[in-house]
Image (cartoon, rainbow, N blue to C red):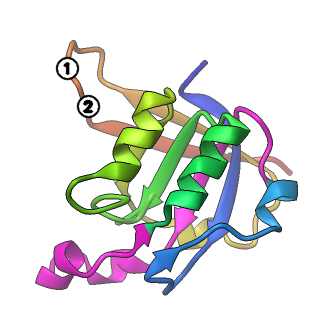
Amino acid sequence: DKFIGRGVLLDVRYESNIKYKGEYSNMIEEEDIVLLFTGHSDRYGTKEYYTEQPVIDKELANFFVQKNIKMLLIELLLIMDLPSPDNYPFEIHKILFANNILIIENLTNLSELVAVKNFNVIAFPLKIRAEASMVRVVACIQI
């Protein structure tokens, strides 16, 4: 059940430091899967993709912990469209992992969900014993 749930897309395009906004309190519920649409996937294949990616602010990471979200997906190509939610020494990684929040990086096509109000996310990891896995992520749009 950790890999399936209600999806919430946060449109944070072109924010270099992704910060908490008050409206997120009403948007995100406990055990949601949060997707960050940064638009950074447009830079995939360039050096800047890895050197100039936006990062998540500590206050936002702590908000995700407080809300007890299941997963954070970051668009690259989240559920996150970035190669990482932060930089060395990876404080945001540590905050999220210490609170059992999974991170999926390097997603694509999150722009397809901007106008979608209700969708579920399913992530299919490989069944292997490892600290990470490739994942197929699917958004199921509710009509």
| Residue at image coords 66%, 50% | 63
Residue 102: quadrant of the picture: top left
The residue that disc 1 covers is: 130
Q: Percent from the top left, x then y, of residue 141?
A: 73, 50
Q: Is residue 79 something one can see in this rendering?
A: no
Of residues 116 and 63, the one nearer the viewer is: 63
Image height check: is 15 above or below 73? below
Q: Which residues are magenta?
A: 28-55
Whether residue 125 appears in magenta in the rendering, the answer is no
Residue 48: quadrant of the picture: bottom left
User: Which secondary structure, mark 2?
Assistant: loop
Label 2 sits on what residue type?
Ser
Of residues 113 and 25, the one nearer the viewer is: 25
Of residues 64 and 42, the one nearer the viewer is: 64
Neighbourhood count class around disc 1 (C-alpha, 10 Å): few under 14, some 14–19, many 20 upward: few
Asked whether the residues under the numbered discs 1 and 2 touch, taking CB atoms below 8 Å apart as contact, a structural biologist would say: yes
Residue 77: quadrant of the picture: bottom left
> Is residue 19 left or right of 29 when viewed as pictured?
left
> Is residue 91 left or right of 115 when viewed as pictured?
left
| Residue at image coords 18%, 72% | 50
